[in-house]
Amino acid sequence: MKLVCHVPSRHYLIGRAGGYLDIAVDCLRLAQPRQPGLSDKQGAQRINTTPHKGRDMNFPTTLELSIGDIRMPFSDDVKYSILGISVLLLVTAIILLVWQVYRYFTQKAGSQDQVNSLLCREDRSTTEGNYGSNVQTPNMKLKSQAVERPDEDSCRLSQCLSPGSPSQEEQTQAQGSLCFSLLYDQLQARLVVTVLEARGLPERRRFRGSVDPSVRVRLLWAGPKDTPTSHQLKCVLREWQSRTVKDSANPTFGDQFSCSLPENDLPRVTVRLEVRDFNKYSRHEILGEVRTHLGGLSLCYPLEIQENLQPPKKDAVGAVLLSLKYLPIAQRLEVGLLKIRTLSRPPSKHTALYARTSVVCNRCNLRHQKTTMKTRWEMTVFNEVMTFALPDPQVTECTILVSVYEVGMGKRSSKRLIGQASLKKGKKAEEEQWSLMMRSLRQPIAKWHPLFI
């Protein structure tokens, strides 16, 4: 059985296509609306088709169509509806634009009035004169004061718009008292510190509930003072932490701590007790502290002491030599940690030091970097440089914080904070080093900075 496939000829295909085109032209002609005064014959002349000679079926040789002949297949009602919707959308867009412009100018004027009210709020309490007699006088005084004292206004505005600084918090008066006892055993050469109780602590803290107090005890050994103007360095001999009492403004601790201490070191030792509010999710807050110098005290029998809490203070425990270098093209800041000077009592070669450096530039916290561990000496040499990429070439605010830690050799869990050094752009002492660095580009500028704890 054979399958025979007949292929249509070329003329047959062309003829069929021409027939279909004739049908389409007829449909267009019938769909075209009739104009008044125009006959069917004249309207048909717009589309002319002439058959090819010598062919069986007709095929259009010319197709003349104009833009005006093509009509939209919609009625007049639909067209007017579309036009009305378009006009309505245009009017709505114009109304929204006018409303946004109006809001922009009114909010700008309102914010300016609010800033002016913040600036002149303090001046209203101290300005003398009768404002009821003349209304224009306060405005003229306010303008003159704003011109003569721009620094005071900007400082006052920053106080209104920004939260309080840590220095302001430290100046607040501490509340409460702490009771503890001291005993020195001459036979065993041991000092015993017992934390008894605290009374009158603040019942509630801001943004938090009741306090969860604990006490940190430090024994500070004072070294010799090099120069009258320099800080007297101290060394932390021992450090203990009491238990935490939950939800109590009058906690009772009863924790006892002891350590070996030669009798000839008693005149140089100071006991520092810090009452801290435990915070599980943030940094612990220091409620106050008590300091007692052991020199001149009779500690043969337990000596019970109760003192009021005082605002916390920091002690100088060393110094760090930092170098700064600014690379303007690469927008990088190089912080060199050269040397660290600390006191160690008694001297030990089984401990090591390392430093953790963090930079906050224009309120952007950059990634911190650590140095390698070095064996602890009285003068530990590092000579390491850490590079930080600055997010903004215009450095308006910058804080460099260096934290020094002590680690036991082979004991990673025995990390202990020795002290911290802070370098801020804006302080009088650190501003000198920062300005020297900006004047001498690509040249390191080194300076000693104290370590506090």
Image: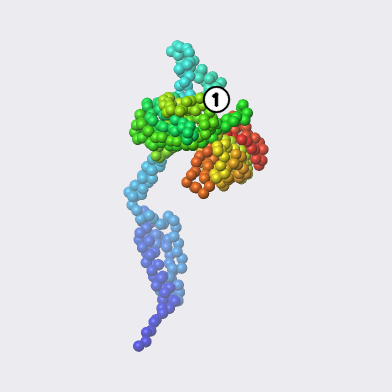
The residue lying toward the viewer, choosing from 77 and 232, is 232
Name the residue: 59% across, 30% down. 224
Q: Position of residue 51 (x, y in %)?
A: 43, 71
Name the residue: 54% across, 31% down. 264
Q: Position of residue 29 (x, y in %)?
A: 37, 61
Left or right of 92 on screen, residue 358: right
When asked about the image quadrant of residue 256, the answer is: top left
Q: Quadrant of the N terminus?
A: bottom left
Tell me if residue 163 can be seen.
no
When asked about the image quadrant of residue 65, the answer is: bottom left
| Disc 1: which residue | 151
In this picture, is 442 found above or below 14? Answer: above
How is this picture coloured?
rainbow
Q: Position of residue 252 (x, y in %)?
A: 36, 31
Left or right of 444 on screen, residue 162: left
In this picture, is 432 found above or below 31? Answer: above
In this picture, is 310 found above or below 4? Answer: above
Q: Position of residue 341 (x, y in %)?
A: 59, 38
Name the residue: 40% across, 26% down. 176
